Amino acid sequence: MKKSLLVAAAVALLAGLVLAGSGTAAPAKAHATFTAALVSDIGKFNDKGFNEGQLAGLKRAGKQLGIKTLEIQSNSSSDYLPNLTTMVREGANIVSAAGYLLAPTLSTVASQFPNVDFTITDDSVKGADFAKAKSVKNIEGLVYASNQSGCLVGYLAGEMAKAKGGKQVIGAVGGIEIPAVDDYIVGYNYCAKLADPGVKVLVGYSQDFVAQDKCKTVAQDQIGQGSQVEFQVAGGCGIGALNAAAGAGIWGIGVDVDQYSLAKNVLTSALKRIDVGIFTADKQAKSGQFKGGSDLLFDMKNNGVGVGKISPKVPKGFITKMNQLKAKLISGKVKVPVAKGSDLLGLLPGAHVGPTH
């Protein structure tokens, strides 16, 4: 769903939910205990990836920081507004929105509750999504250089395809076509061709982050075209792509968290340490060091992105080459392109737009 379609509905519904008769929002309740909350994206907390990973960060904050935690699941985009306002009403000092699609609603809610801290994963407060917001002083963006982790798994995919020989084809299955998804795919495409200049990268989208059958269908279509590796970038939906790869006896690649154990024949996973992002923001807020109006960038340099468990079937020489490439990413000798509209264009030095395939 395009975020622009959510704005009007969010503003209208917010008036009914949070505005009192005086025309102003009621202030958040004061609580002696510090409370951190998380609102999931539509992929839900049992997606074995994006939302579940952020929930792990929240629970870690609760345990290590000694704070109260709240979480609430969004089953559809219509839940964003009531979920965000519910967390504020229940006394949260910081509320984290779990994904890019929540941005229009978050910008509206944050302006109504200036004394509450908010974060958003995979979006920059300096980007287009917040350009028209009344204020972003209480919002912090959690931005990940997923093009870099996409690069490393793409490099391994290219090496494995080249080693197998025959038709040089690999695939990527995206969920909804947004920059946070495409940054992974652009990096995957770019670095696969560093390993195997002749490789063809097939890219398809399910337009869904939940329904596994949709991603399975996209993957099966790519496998029918000769794909030897399938990279899933579609949340819980993408598990269907991993299963399709396993069923066809080819490699699958996970996303966001380590998904090595979710299916057979998983080559590795492109990691985005979303748990660290949530924990870091909650720790900042509790200590009074929250940096509203700015972004936290998680990249290869600060170990904010990376690669999960690698199959023991991968030749050690390929892993050595991948690690050499990683060192070049960290040093800046190799600059991986990003997707059109990516927030990384303004945050990652040397970032430039590249094709998805």
Image (cartoon, helix red, strand yellow):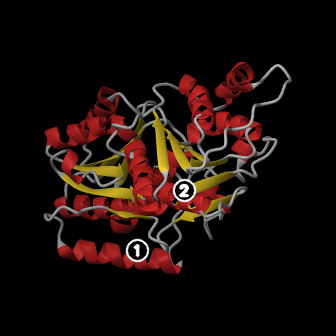
* Residue 12 shows in this picture: yes
Image coordinates for residue 23, horizontal then vertical, percent: 85, 24
Question: Which residue sits at x=57%, y=55%?
Answer: 142
Query: CA–CA distance between discs 2 and 1?
Result: 29 Å
Q: Amino acid at mark 1?
A: Lys
Question: Which residue sits at x=19%, y=50%?
Answer: 261
> Does residue 328 lie above or below 27 as drawn?
below
> Does residue 79 lie above or below 233 as drawn?
above
Image coordinates for residue 6, horizontal then vertical, percent: 65, 26
- Identify the secondary structure beneath mark 2: helix
In this view, the residue in front, 267 or 99, is 99
Labels in figure, total? 2
Disc 1 target residue: 326
Badge 1: residue crowd in 10 Å (few <14, some 14–19, many ≥20): many
- Identify the secondary structure beneath mark 1: helix
Q: Mark number for residue 68?
A: none
Image coordinates for residue 310, horizontal then vertical, percent: 23, 63
Name of the residue lying farthest toward the right:
22
